Image (spheres, helix red, strand yellow):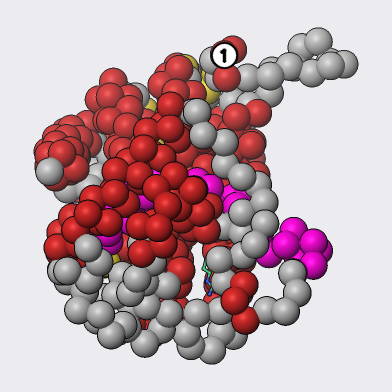
C-alpha cells in the first residue's frame, strides 16, 4: 500500500518497520472520535472558504457514511493501515475521490491525534465518573442499613475502639467521593480543543478554531500550538485518578478478604462472587477481591509507563507518544471492569453483624472509655489512662474483659469507680457518645449519609448537563 506521505521517498518502507510502527491494532478504538473530529474540521474548512463548499459537503457525507458502516459493523478496518487517521482518510478518498484529498488542509496528524485522544479521554472520564457514583449509591444503601451495627475499629490491625459498620463504610464513601472529583478534574483538563496547532507551529490557513471547538463541545481552544501537540498531561491526570481509585478499591478488597477469613468471620462473600478449589472441596475464595487488588498494580504500571514515555521528550511531537494509547486504554478497561464487578459484589456481600459485635466485645476496645469515665469523675487524663492500663494488664493475665471486673476489684485500683461504670463502658455507650460530626455514633453517621446523598444528587444533576 503506498503511504500518503510517500512523496519524498525513493523506496517503500520495510515490512519490518510497517509492522513495528503500526498503531492501528489499538488506535482503531479512536475511530469514532477521529471521524467526528474530521467532520467538524471539514465543516469549518467549508464555512471559511478554505475548501469549496461542495467538497466540504462531500467530505462530511463521506465521513458520515464511514461512521454509519463502522457503527453497523459493516466496514472492516484494514490492519495494514499505519494508523486510524490514515485509514479513515484513505477510506474517504476511496469513496468520494478528489474532494477527500482536501480534508487534511491546515491539519497535521499531530494535532489530529491530540484531538481524538482528548475526545476519548472525556468519554473515559465520564464513564469512570458514572461507575464510581454507582458504587457510592451502593455504599449509602449499605451504610443506612448498618448505622447501628457495632464492630471493632482497628489501628495497626489491632483492635482499637468500637465503631459502627455504617461509619466504616462511609469512610470509603469519602474516598470514592474524592475520586469523582478527580475524574471531573481530569475531564476539564481534556476539554481543550487542539486543532489549529498543525504539526507544531500552527497553520497559515484562516481556520476558525472556536467554531471547531463549539461543534465538538469543547470548553476552550488550546493556547500554544507546540504545547498542544506535545501534551499528554490530560492522560496522566486520568491515569492518576484511575490509580488512586484502584488503590481505594484495593484497600477495600483487602479488608473484605480479611473479614471473610475464618479468623475474622465478619463477612460472608456471596457464592456468585467466589470461586472454589480444584483440590480442596471446602474452599470458597474471594477471587474477585484478590484480582482487583492485583489489577491495581497493573493500573499503576500504566501510569508509570506514560510518565516514563514522556519524561525525556524534547518539544514538540515525538513518535514515542504513540505509546500513550495502550497504557491509557488498558488502565481504562481495567478500572471499568473492577468498578463494575466490585459494586455488584459488594451489594451481594453479607455482613455478619453478630460476629462483628462479638468481636468488638473482646480485646478491650472500651479501655479508652474506661479512662474517659475516670476523667468524668475528676481525674486527670494521664492518671486515668494509667489506671485503665493497669486494669487491662490484669485482665490480659486473667483472660477477662474490663466489664468482668467487680466493683471491689475496680475500687482497689481507684476509689473513683462507682456502679455506673458498667453502663459507661458498654459498647453501645462507647459508640453513641462519639457523636461529634464525623464520628461513628449512629446519629453522626446518619447525618453523614444525608450529606452524602445530597452531594451525590448534585453530582448526578451536573453529570446530566
Ligand atoms: N499514530 C500516531 C500517534 O498515535 C499519530 C500521529 C503521527 N504523527 C506523526 N508525525 N507521525 O501518535
Name the side, left or right, on which 456 lies relative to 390: left
Tell me where residue 361 appears, x and y as whole percent: 45, 29
Label 1 residue SS: helix
The residue depicted at 53 percent of the width and 48 percent of the height is 28
Camera-side residue: 344 or 142?
Answer: 344
Tell me where residue 162 appears, x and y as whole percent: 38, 37
Camera-side residue: 66 or 282?
Answer: 66
Residue 286, visible in the rendered structure: yes
Residue 328 painted magenta? no
The residue depicted at 77 percent of the width and 12 percent of the height is 282
Vertical placement of residue 123 versus 350, above or below: below
Vertical placement of residue 407 versus 349, above or below: below
Q: Name the quadrant of the C terminus.
A: top left
Tell me where residue 295 appears, x and y as whole percent: 61, 45
Single out the residue that lies furthest toward the right: 279
Residue 405, visible in the rendered structure: no
Q: Which residues are magenta?
A: 13-42
Camera-side residue: 386 or 166?
Answer: 166
Tell me where residue 388 appears, x and y as whole percent: 42, 49
The residue depicted at 60 percent of the width and 29 percent of the height is 288
Considering the whole magenta stretch, tell me its main secondary structure.
helix
Query: According to the image, label 1 marks what residue?
Result: 272
Q: Where on the picture, by quarter, is residue 5?
A: bottom right
Name the side, left or right, on which 451 lies relative to 216: left
Name the side, left or right, on which 135 lies relative to 315: left
The residue depicted at 48 percent of the width and 88 percent of the height is 315
Residue 16 painted magenta? yes
Amino acid at each position: 500500500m503506498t503511504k500518503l506521505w510517500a512523496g519524498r521517498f525513493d523506496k517503500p518502507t520495510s515490512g519490518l518497520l510497517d509492522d513495528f510502527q503500526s498503531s492501528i491494532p489499538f488506535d482503531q478504538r479512536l475511530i469514532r472520535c477521529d471521524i467526528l473530529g474530521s467532520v467538524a474540521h471539514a465543516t469549518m474548512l467549508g464555512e471559511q472558504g478554505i475548501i469549496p463548499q461542495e467538497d466540504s459537503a462531500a467530505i462530511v457525507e463521506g465521513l458520515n457514511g464511514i461512521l454509519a458502516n463502522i457503527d453497523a459493523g459493516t466496514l472492516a478496518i484494514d490492519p495494514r493501515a499505519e494508523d486510524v487517521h490514515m485509514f479513515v482518510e484513505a477510506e474517504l478518498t476511496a469513496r468520494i475521490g478528489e474532494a477527500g484529498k482536501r480534508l487534511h488542509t491546515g491539519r497535521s496528524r499531530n494535532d489530529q491525534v491530540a484531538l481524538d485522544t482528548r475526545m476519548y479521554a472525556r468519554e473515559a472520564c465520564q464513564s469512570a465518573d458514572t461507575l464510581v457514583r454507582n458504587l457510592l449509591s451502593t455504599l449509602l444503601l449499605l451504610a443506612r442499613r448498618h448505622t447501628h451495627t457495632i464492630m471493632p475499629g482497628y489501628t495497626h490491625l489491632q483492635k482499637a475502639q468500637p465503631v459502627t459498620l455504617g461509619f466504616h463504610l462511609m469512610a470509603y464513601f469519602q474516598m470514592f467521593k474524592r475520586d469523582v472529583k478527580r475524574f471531573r478534574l481530569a475531564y476539564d483538563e481534556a476539554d481543550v480543543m487542539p486543532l489549529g496547532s498543525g504539526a507544531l507551529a500552527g497553520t497559515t490557513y484562516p481556520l476558525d478554531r472556536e467554531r471547531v471547538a463549539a461543534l465538538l463541545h469543547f470548553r476552550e481552544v488550546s493556547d500554544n500550538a507546540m504545547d498542544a501537540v506535545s501534551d499528554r498531561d490530560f492522560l496522566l491526570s486520568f491515569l492518576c485518578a484511575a490509580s488512586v481509585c484502584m488503590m481505594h478499591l484495593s484497600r477495600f478488597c483487602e479488608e473484605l478478604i480479611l473479614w471473610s477469613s475464618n479468623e475474622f468471620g465478619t463477612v460472608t462473600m456471596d457464592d456468585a462472587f467466589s470461586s472454589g478449589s480444584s483440590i480442596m472441596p471446602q474452599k470458597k475464595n474471594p477471587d474477585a477481591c484478590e484480582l482487583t487488588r492485583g489489577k491495581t498494580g497493573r493500573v499503576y504500571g500504566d501510569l508509570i509507563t506514560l510518565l516514563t514515555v514522556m519524561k525525556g521528550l524534547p518539544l514538540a511531537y515525538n513518535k514515542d507518544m504513540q505509546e500513550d494509547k495502550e497504557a491509557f486504554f488498558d488502565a481504562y478497561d481495567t478500572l471499568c471492569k473492577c468498578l463494575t464487578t466490585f459494586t455488584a459484589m459488594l451489594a451481594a456481600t453479607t455482613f455478619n453483624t453478630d460476629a462483628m459485635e462479638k468481636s468488638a466485645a473482646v480485646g478491650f476496645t472500651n479501655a479508652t472509655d474506661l479512662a474517659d469515665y475516670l476523667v468524668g469523675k475528676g481525674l486527670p487524663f494521664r492518671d486515668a489512662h494509667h489506671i485503665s492500663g493497669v486494669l487491662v494488664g490484669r485482665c490480659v493475665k486473667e483472660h477477662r474483659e474490663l466489664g468482668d471486673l467487680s466493683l471491689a476489684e475496680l475500687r482497689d485500683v481507684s476509689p473513683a469507680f462507682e456502679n455506673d461504670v458498667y453502663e459507661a463502658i458498654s459498647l453501645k455507650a462507647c459508640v453513641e457518645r462519639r457523636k461529634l460530626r464525623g464520628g461513628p455514633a449512629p446519629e453522626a453517621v446518619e447525618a453523614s449519609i444525608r450529606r452524602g446523598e445530597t452531594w451525590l444528587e448534585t453530582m448526578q444533576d451536573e453529570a446530566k448537563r
